[in-house]
Image: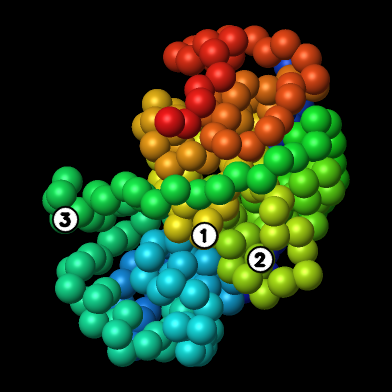
Amino acid sequence: MDITLEPTMSYVVGAKQAHKDVSVYTDTLLVEIPVALEYNGISHAVLMSTPENLEDLALGFSLSEGIIHNERELYDVEIQNSSFGVTLKMKISSQQFSALKSKHRNMVGSSGCGICGVQSLQQITPATSNVYPKDIADNAVEKAVMAIKGHQALRLETGSSHGAAWCSTDGEIQLLREDVGRHNALDKLIGARLKHPEIDADGFVLLSSRIGYELVQKCAQAEVGTLVAISAATSLAAQLAQNINMTLIGFARDQQYVIYNKGSATISPTTSTTSSPTISSTVINETR
């Protein structure tokens, strides 16, 4: 397997249209490689990821998985390349490393994975601490959704990357990270956000993908109060959001969106919404 450390690569493909011969041209593909995560010399996980912003991935994953509680507990990240992939060799505090070893967790994730590889159901521990969503402008979601595609350089070039954006309370996209895996894109964003204290701390996350349970969990670990996505939320994602006071919004497109849980924030949809397959958009859940 050839390993490239660029986020994209050229590839010769054939195109076929009905009643026409195959035409050959060079396309641009999104790169996906194995990325091993190592803490204090001990292997922890292998993700399939796009080799860009890997230091952000290391920091964001460590925080969103509860391995560290803040960026100060991650002392160093060394990126080691090989013919097999990339290893992120991280040095964390002895206290956090001791806690990590006690979990006995070793996983192989497919393009990033939130709870893959846990050894028993008892190891799945949902977030329990409340987050505190801030009020956002009425048109903030619409504004951010309209802008995100223009910020996704890898998607525009390849058509195959997920995006995760940090948006201000008025809908301005302030940071964006991309990856072949939606979990990785979010982890990269979480890591990047910690490095940019100048951005709007009261803003929200916008994802180009659906919202699964583990994405809500990751946002909760990073103390994100509002999570918005262009696609739907799953049942567990909606239930977890309600349990922890998170504002959760899905199907954000075409000047409308579905509010799965309102949390304690003030937000007013600009138009009526259509029904999702499992949750009526006419019901706005209030966190109790």
Which amino acid type is marked by label 2?
A: Arg
Contact (Cβ within 8 Å) of mark 2 with mark 3: no
Of labels 1 and 3, the one closer to you: 1
Real-space Cα distance between discs 1 and 3? 24 Å
Which amino acid type is marked by label 1?
A: Ala
- Residue 158 visible here: no
Per the image, label 3 sits on a secondary structure element best described as: loop
Left or right, 39 with reference to 223: left
Give x and y (percent) for residue 213.
41, 40
Q: Please report the residue visible at 67 percent of the width from the left and 75 percent of the height from the top.
A: 195
- Would you name the residue on which mark 1 appears? 222
Real-space Cα distance between discs 2 and 3? 31 Å
Give x and y (percent) for residue 118.
22, 55
Mark drawn on residue 193: 2
Sort mark 2 into few (<14), some (14-19) or many (20+) by Cα contacts within 10 Å. Answer: many
Left or right, 137 with reference to 107: right
Of pointers 2 and 3, the one earlier in the residue sequence: 3
Q: Please report the residue visible at 20 percent of the width from the left and 54 percent of the height from the top.
A: 123
Q: Quadrant of the C terminus?
A: top left
- Would you name the residue on which mark 3 appears? 119
Left or right, 223 with reference to 236: right
Which amino acid type is marked by label 3?
A: Gln
Contact (Cβ within 8 Å) of mark 2 with mark 1: yes
Q: Report how many numbered discs are placed on residues in the image.
A: 3
Left or right, 59 with reference to 100: right
